[in-house]
Image (cartoon, rainbow, N blue to C red):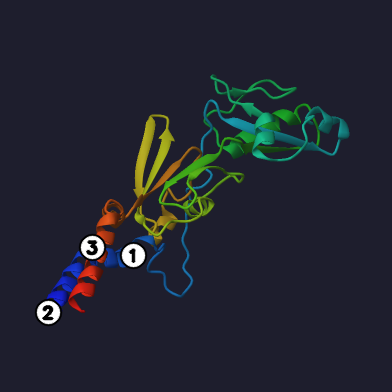
Amino acid sequence: MKKLATTILKMVFVMMLPALLTGCASRKNILMLQGLSEQTATFTNAGKSSYKLHKGDNLYIKVYSVDEKTSKFFQSDLPNLMNPTYLFLNSYTIDEGGFIHVSFIDKLQVEGLTIEQSKVLIQKALNEYFKECTVVVKLVNFQVSVLGEVNSPGTYTVEKEEVNLFQALGRAGGARDFSNLRRVILVRQTDNGSKVQVLDMTKQSILESEFFYLMPNDIVYIEPVKAKTSIGSSPYLLISTLSLALLALNIFLK
């Protein structure tokens, strides 16, 4: 009887072996920047701040001046809360022609410019009407979506002018245990449609990738490891198998 019980236990072990090995497989896929030594490493990346403005983008434009009369021209009646709603309500939309219409100055062509270039253009235009004024320009609709194997999937508004993959992952609560950081799918909108790029966040080279810094409306999808699919589709099989083993032991070892 004991020999039969031992045989059953061996069979159960073989059936549950994939589940037991899942932890090792997922750990290999979830560790970021693998291979870094204890010494300091330096990586360069020139891909940030390259977003070009498009039709429909909303620019928040704030003008500061030491002259109180000048400042009043650009003050809003809304409380200065500096949250996404406030920024949106005080923003200027780029029209179908690629122009924005700012108070007291003619329309300005900003489509195709970076945020910094649009700031310089607006500053130059305002200098013709006002003295000693400073312009602040922010892109209101800078949002990225992080989906898949993360703790808090969703769409997030970026307050700064740039955000990288790791920061976006942090916004989404970090990766789950079954995430496959070797296959991170980036979907980016371009003038010619959507561009899909597969990224590996476990490699150090991601720090120098042109896709390390995200663009407005980027979608980041983190795939699950294959082990999750196989285990997740048959949880009752594991429970049944374990129950059968315990029942066999209870019968044959008495």
Residue of label 2: 3
Which quarter of the rendering shows the N terminus?
bottom left
The amino acid on which the numbered mark 1 sits, given as a three-letter code, is Lys
Question: Residue 22's spot in the image, x, y percent?
Answer: 30, 63
Furthest-right residue in this view: 68
- Tell me if label 3 and label 1 are in contact, CB under 8 Å: no
Of marks 1 and 2, the one in the foreground: 2
Question: Residue 12's spot in the image, x, y percent?
Answer: 20, 68
Horizontally, is 142 left or right of 136 in the view?
Answer: left
Element assignment for label 3:
helix
- Neighbour tally class for label 2: few under 14, some 14-19, many 20 plus, Cα within 10 Å: few
Residue of label 1: 28
- Neighbour tally class for label 1: few under 14, some 14-19, many 20 plus, Cα within 10 Å: some
Which quarter of the rendering shows the C terminus?
bottom left
Quadrant of the rendered image containing residue 142: top right
Residue of label 3: 241
What residue is drawn where x is 66% and y is 22%? 101
